[in-house]
Amino acid sequence: MNKRILGLALPNIITNITVPLLGMVDMAIVGHLSANHIGGITIGTGIFNLIYWCFGFLRMGTSGLTAQSYGARRFDESVRILVRGSAIALAIALLLIVLQRPISRMGLAIFNGSNTVMSLAMSYFFVRIWAAPATLGLFAIKGWFIGMQNSKLPMWIAIFINVVNILCSLLFVLVLNWGIEGVALGTVIAQYSGLAIALFFAVRYYGKIIRRHFDLRSSLQLSALKGFFRVNGDIFLRTVCLVAVFTSITSISGDISDEVLAIDALLLQFFTLFSYIMDGFAYAGESLVGRYIGAKDSASLHKTIRLLIGWGLATVVTFTTLYALGDKWILSWFTNKEDLILATHKYLPWVLVIPICGFSAFLFDGIYVGATASRQMRNSMFVATACFFATYFCQWVCLERNGDSLDSEYNNALWLAFMVFLTMRGIMQALLLKKAVYRQIPATDSKRISGA
């Protein structure tokens, strides 16, 4: 079982690691143009992060439902889920393109910058928005591959997309001098290239199953769509809460001071680095939990969850040690400003507890997605989000009454609220685990899969 978990987790970890590489290359390319271009691409990508993060349910919902169909050997239903997810992704993408003007105005209202920076951000936005069909289509296809117990194909697709994106951006910006529009166009070409290679892989490895069971009419039946939206509607609401928390962290940091904003941006890199590894195990959880629920294999389901928690605890020990011994070294990846590194270092205790507070939230997300227990996952996020805002604002009121509170006190209050948020997600999902996951397989229906 450990071999199976690692076989699914490691390709996803490699996939996650390729994401910051692309961001760093894009930043380096526009960094040779001007500081305004850096600000423009930062805001432009921020707008798309908000948009696409909200539609992450297209991947998560598809993977969980597909994994359960795979476990039940219902390949006809697996194909219908792929068609259903892809069709909904296309419909949402076309809606985004039609509504690109209102969406751009929303972006202008959320993010702040000089007129020059915002103009560059909009130039980037109006080119990259045309990648929406490919980007959202890839969400559905990648989720389907994960549900079909195949994490290697999404890994190769991600690597291919990033290579194409980097090469196109270098050509369009440094050779053809197309500026920030060239970076956006590179992303558009890379996304459609990735969609093409994903479709090729789907036909190459699953063509026989797809051709045998493809039925557009049955895939898009109203009853089936209602079930799909029920699961994914809950995931959407859960993601909105997640976006609200992280947007608030950035907003509150900026309100405290520019220095705190920079410090917290660096501190969040430690969270992001940890999340790349934990997400790999969460994706493995999606695949295996869904598979064993679909197969009604209670013994393998329990064993998978126990082993995932074991891998999570091992990752906690590894990252806590790494952060304790190498925090300055890690910070030097992101900045060479010694004064900023020194200012950030005093918040090291928060960095050390990130793995402890956060690991269970990541693992249980994967387990719940595989079990399609979206309602319980949504409710857990509601409670955690309420705890985040309540924790921060109670402290804020006390600090405001003092009248002479330091910026560091406000920032410590913010990070305490964030740790409470992460911890409450894990606690709530642990409390609901039996009802949300284990009870999906009644004892009388349980059976084993040979080789599990």
Image: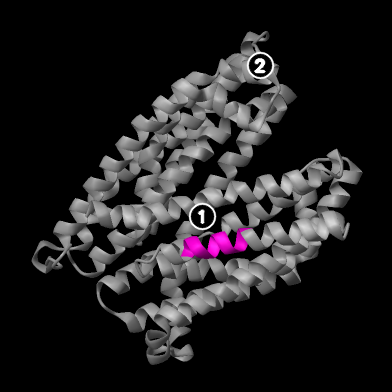
SS for tag 1?
Answer: helix
Residue 195's x, y, as percent?
Answer: 59, 72
- Which is nearer the eye, 224 or 362? 362
Residue 316's x, y, as percent?
Answer: 36, 33
Residue drawn where x is 59% and y is 69% of the image? 194
Report whether 73 appears left or right of 131. left
Looking at the rendering, which quadrant does residue 76 occupy?
bottom left
| Image quadrant occupied by the C terminus | bottom left
Main secondary structure along the magenta-highlighted residues: helix
Q: Which residue is mark 1?
A: 237
Residue 232's x, y, as percent?
Answer: 47, 64
Report whether 55 appears left or right of 374. right
Colour scheme in use? one colour
Q: Nearer the viewer, mark 2 or mark 1?
A: 2
Q: Which residues are magenta?
A: 154-162
Q: Is residue 155 magenta-colored? A: yes
